[in-house]
Amino acid sequence: MSLLAASLRVEIGGYVSALALVYSTLIVAWVIGSWVMAAEIRPGRFAPVLHFLEAVVGPFIAIFRRFIPMLGPVDISPLVALLVVQFGGGLLASLIAG
């Protein structure tokens, strides 16, 4: 029974780690998409992808924008959000996996 529980914990930890990796990738894609929009390049057929990224990542980034001021024209809140996801996801995955 404990072997099954240990195996399940390792599997769940792996899923949490993979989820953190996927969300980190979405944050990076959101940053690139925001650069495209800021450069006033028409997204064309990628507009639905940019809307999806805004809907999924935008609210999470907004949490950090409330507390982190912009450094001139540079918004570092996506970087902080990325670090939180990476470190938080890694910590949570290792705690779950044991």
Image (spheres, rainbow, N blue to C red):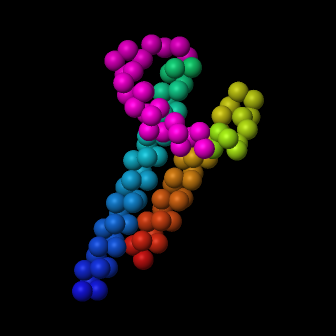
Instruction: Where is residue 88? Give x, y as percent.
Output: 53, 59
Instruction: Please state the extent of the stretch shown in magenta in the rendering.
Output: 39-63
Residue depicted at 28% across the width and 76% down the height: 7
Determine whether, in the image, residue 48 is placed left or right of residue 28: left
| Residue 78 seen anywhere in this rendered image of the structure | no
79 versus 13 height, above or below:
above
Instruction: Where is residue 34? Give x, y as percent.
Output: 53, 27
Residue depicted at 72% across the width and 34% down the height: 70
Q: Quadrant of the N terminus?
A: bottom left
Instruction: Where is residue 89? Give x, y as percent.
Output: 48, 59
Determine whether, in the image, residue 31 is placed left or right of residue 46: right
Residue furthest bottom in the image: 1
57 versus 93 height, above or below:
above
Determine whether, in the image, residue 91 is placed left or right of residue 5: right
Task: Find out whether residue 57 is within the magenta segment.
Answer: yes
Residue 50 position by quadrant: top left
Residue depicted at 35% across the width and 63% down the height: 14
Task: Find out whether residue 24 is within the magenta segment.
Answer: no
19 versus 54 height, above or below:
below
